[in-house]
Amino acid sequence: MPLAKLCNENFNGVRTRILMKNICYAGVLAALLDLDLEQIRSLLAETYAKKPQLVDSNMKAIQLGYDYAKQNFSSARCRSSSRSRKMSKTAGHIMIDGNTAAALGCVYAGATVAAWYPITPSTSVMDAFKAFCDRLRVDPETGRKNFAFIQAEDELAAIGMTIGAMWNGARAFTATSGPGISLMSEFIGLAYYAEVPAVIFDIQRVGPSTGMPTRTQQCDVLAAAYASHGDTRHVCLFPSNPEECFYMAVQAFDLAERLQTPVFVLSDLDIGMNDWMCRDLKWDDGYRPDRGKVLGKEEIEKLEKFHRYLDKDGDGIPYRTLPGVHPKGAYFTRGSGHSQYGTYTEDSDRVSDRAGSPAAQVGDGEEARAARDHRCHGGQRHRPRVDSAAAMARSTKPWMCSRRRACA
Amino acid sequence: MILAIGQENAFPWIERDLGIEFDKWDVPAVDKVTFQSTRPGVFFGGDAAFGPKNIIWAVEQGHQAAISIHRHCQGEPVADRLPPGVNLQSRKMGMHEWSYANDYAPVERRLMPHVSLKERFKKLNIEVELGFTAEQAAQEVQRCLNCDVQTVFEAKLCIECDACIDICPVDCLTITENGEEADLRSRLKAPAKNLTQPLYVSVRAQADRARDGEGRGHLRALWALRRALPDSRVGHAEVQRPLASRRRRRARHRGEEAAHRVARPLNNSQLAEASHVTDDDSKINDFAIKIATVNGTGSASANTLLMKSIFRSGIPVMGKNYFPSNIQGLPTWYEIRVTKQGYVARSGQVDIMVAMNAETYARDVKEVAPGGYPHLRLDVAASLRC
């Protein structure tokens, strides 16, 4: 099929010819598959709404290919048995890729800070987020942007900014891939230990190291689950299609702030960068972000002293404050071993002294046994993580049962 | 027709009374334009005509001789030749496409097998070069000597970088001030001997206007392209090949890589043979298209357009992009799968292949599902020259 000849005869300029040659085959396929030219025409008009002259040249190329194919390949011997026929199975569906859906989810979740370092295949999450924010988060009167969008100098800075922003009370996230998770490890450990929420999208690709940047794999599951060194374990969400990317993005923020810990959304290149047919995304306008246990000004005022890591409710989640709200709310954010009162300690008793926590005690006492035989509200038995004294400080973290709720 | 692949010219087998004149070196006198000897109907080309040069000359001479022979057979004057014409086709190679094709190929050079010294001492006038083995010959004939480069000049894109001037082996390009023809000719780098032949002149106005601040009237001639005629090639007997084409030549030596071993697209009758089209409904809204293109050529737009128009026709569809990595010039594949049920995984079978990438053509064409369901194997292959 002399595509080049057709294009050379009808278009000038080397670059134009190359582009038109590709559009031309779309016309050829349209002819072979009995596609509706009108659909194509209206699609072109939409795509190039801002540059109408491109619509004409593209449509011309399509027509060239279409006409040629119809003239030369429509004999019975050449007709393709692969054909299309109109259906109505796409009603109520959209075509979207996972990264765009995730970005949309971040917007709906109320994320206002996005920091990242570019890496295939996660960059398009950020590009989409920025595009959405430019449309939806700019004050129409003042032109003020209600979001912060920062390309950091590397992944370490990106996760640092994300954690800092979340610590400060904003909803922030970053998107990266396998190599980025490796780089972010220490910061992730800090967020985990100091109990600062963070949302991290890992759009997985083939590793290790640079691996194959444009091939899909799901190899970071363990790396994300245990990110950082020592005794860490994280909440991971696993979307299986772009639709779930949207919903889980929103859930990620709620979980991160409720549990005060990093949350990973483990998508992959195939979900993230390819267009899938998905059901229309649904949104309940009654949604309210779950900000977790955050003390307001009046509540802090009533306290004698605020302790950031004090497990008051016995559910393993202390209350946190946001900077600038009340002077009594200030605290030392500690990444080193600490007691409930936030003091540095290597003393296992003090570390384990968390009032009311069923999983905190070691030894043979009744409470300890209760801790070991702890049953969650779902009636499922599971062991709390009490492997070592050092782990005690973290053992008040709720075990994630299948219902993903903090166990009392 | 006698193909004489020898080491030196020797014509002991031509009787000297046939009307074929020989010159003082005992080689036939051959007309430079028609390649005819002094006896009508006998033509010489290659080493036998004007002594050893390179293969490209031999090919050209053979071509010219063929034209002469044809005219001779038609009873037309052999010396009549068509006027020279130029037919420019655009060939744009992206930077990476070009640099890949030009990579130095560190393969073993095929050495001409020689008779062993022992044999040579026994018989001093033995023919030393044995000729290539069949295998070597097969590899040698795949070498493209790339004598076909045709550059395209577009006035509005020119930045006067002088690269074309540097690389031109025959000095036929000149960047100079505009002027009347006679004036312009005096400033050509290599003036033409044949004044009836036109100069190709391209004029660039925009930048010059900005620089000189003058109105529309002041134009500068940008290139005066003097077409190289056979007579002007005298004196360029050993044309210094530009570096780029030498590298391209070496690149073609790659034996195993299929990159330049390209299958020919099927013609219509071959297609007809290959297809067994029935009115079987099984492939309605149930097929996979794979589109093989080059990254950076606008294929993504075309593919998305296609996929979305299928989607808007109410048919479940999915698209998956495969590419080695996002660098311009490298191959990329896009698979569109259409199913009534809305499957999102790859089908593992390609029903229609749109093969737009010469580099991967051979491999792409093989991927199309053979037999099985009646289907059409359609090679929508672009012309390889563009």
Image (spheres, rainbow, N blue to C red):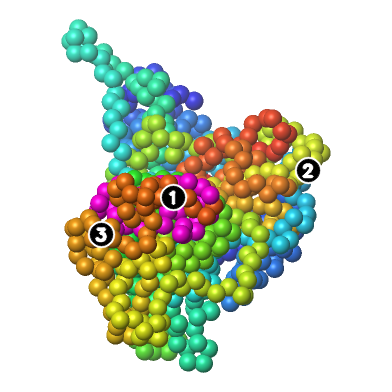
Instruction: Write down the region rendered in magenta.
Output: A379-408
Q: Tell me which numbered mark, 3 or 1, is placed earlier along the sequence.
A: 3
Q: Amino acid at mark 2?
A: Ser
Residue A253, image x, y percentages = 46, 67
Residue A22, image x, y percentages = 57, 56
Does the stretch in magenta take in A255? no
| Element on which disc 2 rests | loop
Q: Is residue A10 left or right of residue A349?
A: right
Q: Name the residue nearer the viewer: A335 or B53.
A: A335
Label disc, if present, on residue A75 of the rendered structure: 2
Q: Amino acid at mark 1?
A: His
Q: Is residue B38 left or right of residue A91?
A: left
Q: CA distance from mark 3 to mark 1?
A: 20 Å
Residue depth check, mark 1 versus mark 2: number of the one nearer the observer: 1
Q: Tell me which numbered mark, 1 or 2, is placed earlier along the sequence.
A: 2
| Element on which disc 3 rests | helix
Residue that sits furthest to the right in the current view: B279
Say which chain tag 1 marks.
Answer: A
